[in-house]
Amino acid sequence: MNERKMDLSEQMRLPKEVNRILYVKNLPTKITAEQLYEIFGKYGAIRQIRKGIAGDTKGSAFIVYEDIFDAKNAMDHLKGMQVAGKYLAVRYFDKDRLLKRIEIRKAKQEIENLKKKLS
């Protein structure tokens, strides 16, 4: 018989929301990129970390893993972890949710512009 071993990715089906990018909120604002690599790197190879620097994005970051299973492992272990007295809010990046937020922000801005024109 010609049986072959299935690798882990073939054995395990992941939910559709699982991806290589984690969105982390409630980070201490003074956390460094090196500290983020130290915390998140324990779960696999990281391709990129993007820390929020603007006023409304401070305390958040995108963590991009090389492998989807490493991202899932990090999510499973770090969700709710306490860092410098703050509990991390970790979820998978959702492109559709981001686009919806951008559309809402644009619509609100258009409404504000119309209000200014009419007053």
Image: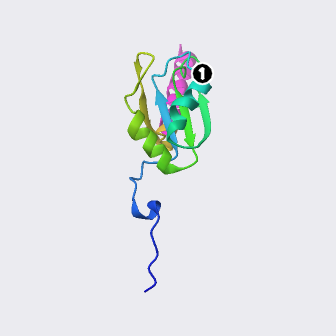
The part of the image, by quadrant, that contains residue 12 is: bottom left
Q: Position of residue 40 (x, y in %)?
A: 52, 34
Residue extending farthest to the top is 119
Name which residue lies at 52% across and 25% down: 60
Q: Nearer the viewer, residue 84 or 54?
A: 84
Q: Is residue 85 above or below residue 75?
A: above
Name which residue lies at 39% across and 40% down: 76
Disc 1 residue type (three-letter)? Thr
Q: Is residue 93 above or below residue 50?
A: below
Q: Nearer the viewer, residue 7 or 100?
A: 7
Q: Is residue 37 above or below residue 11?
A: above
Q: Nearer the viewer, residue 19 or 39?
A: 39
The local crowd at label 1, few if under 14, some if 14 to 19, many if 20 or more residues have their Cα within 10 Å, is few
The part of the image, by quadrant, that contains residue 45 is: top right
Quadrant where the N terminus sits is: bottom left
Region in magenta: 100-119
Location of mark 1 (residue) = 32
Q: Position of residue 90 (x, y in %)?
A: 43, 33
| Secondary structure category for the residue under label 1 | loop
Q: Is residue 74 above or below residue 15?
A: above
The part of the image, by quadrant, that contains residue 63 is: top right
